[in-house]
Image (spheres, rainbow, N blue to C red):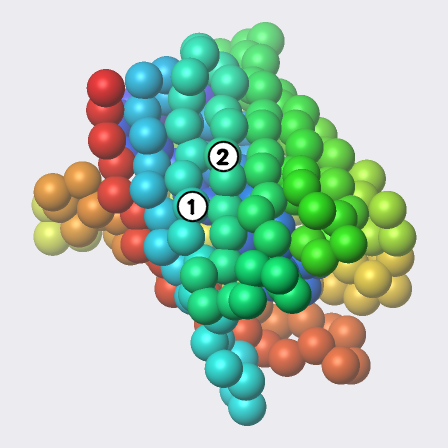
Amino acid sequence: MLHHCRSCFFKTTSLTILGSVLVSAGFASPSGLNNIPTADVVPQHVLVLQGYGFMAEGSRADWWGGFKAGPLKNLEVGIDGQLNADPFSDGALAGQFKYRYQPLDGTALAAGMANIGDTDRSGEIDYYAVVSQDLKYLRAHLGATFQKDNEGIFAGLDSTFPLFERDLTLRTDLRQTNGRDDLLGSLGFMYELGWNFILETWGSFPTQNDAEKTLTLKLNYVIEF
């Protein structure tokens, strides 16, 4: 699916995160770029523990925790939940799963469901399909979400290169939101810190009038079993 450098990175450190803050605050996070899923999955026998926060101007930070894992080859499952919320008012646990299929070298397809849980508190279930294509020096991703009242197309690009003898991945994506009336764009990066830790951060820039620009910080810890 990827050329040698990126393939090693994604297989051993287990990929990126979704974490969409505009679509739904309780959105369980499949592997992806900033605000979109991709056809990447956590490798089999790998567990990724995650802690992350959403920060917007004039609002308190929301802190989340969760995990994603590869119990079987090409299958990813995960659960997220808000850490600083009243469990009886908001911040319900949300689950996700995704299955990946690779028909050609360099091309991968995936379909999945995210935001599985208490839809009254965490939003509607999101069904999605996505294709990821390796273009040698970067990867391109294109897909669609079928979440009720929030259907739309999404796309993204990422590129990985060495920095201080570790892998740095630059990422950008764009998705339709609010019933295709608005867009959510983002810019960010992922950096391998060592000792099985991966740092991610990105800024999200919605066009929706009542939606704030948001900064997301995420720390991942990768366990192989």
Query: Going 49% across and 82% down the picture, which residue do you hit?
Result: 60
**Mark 2 element type:** strand
Q: Is residue 9 left or right of residue 150?
A: left
Q: Is residue 117 left or right of residue 81?
A: right
How far, Cα to Cα, is label 1 from label 2? Answer: 7 Å
Question: Which disc is residue 66 wearing?
Answer: 1
CB within 8 Å, label 1 to label 2: yes
Image height check: is 21 above or below 109? below
Residue 5 position, x and y percent, is: 26, 30
- Coordinates of residue 84 in the picture (x, y in percent): 46, 68
Q: Residues within 10 Å of mark 1 (few under 14, many from 20)?
A: many
Amino acid identity at mark 1? Gly
Look at the numbered disc 1 and give the secondary structure of its residue: strand
Q: Position of residue 19 (x, y in %)?
A: 53, 53
Residue position for label 2:
78
Q: Earlier in the sequence, mark 1 or mark 2?
A: 1
Q: Quadrant of the N terminus?
A: top left
Tell me the tag on residue 198.
Answer: none
User: Considering only vertical position in the picture, is 183 above or below 19?
Assistant: below
The part of the image, by quadrant, that contains residue 165 is top left
For the C terminus, give its image quadrant: top left
The residue at 52%/67% (across/down) is: 85
Q: Measured from the top left, where is residue 211 in percent x and y?
A: 70, 77
Residue at the extreme bottom = 58
Of 80 and 153, the residue lying toward us? 80
Residue found 46% across the figure and 76% down from its top: 61
- Residue at image position (37%, 16%) is 44
Q: Is residue 115 above or below residue 204?
A: above
The quadrant holding residue 15 is top left
Of residues 176 and 51, the one nearer the viewer is 51
State how many labels appear.
2
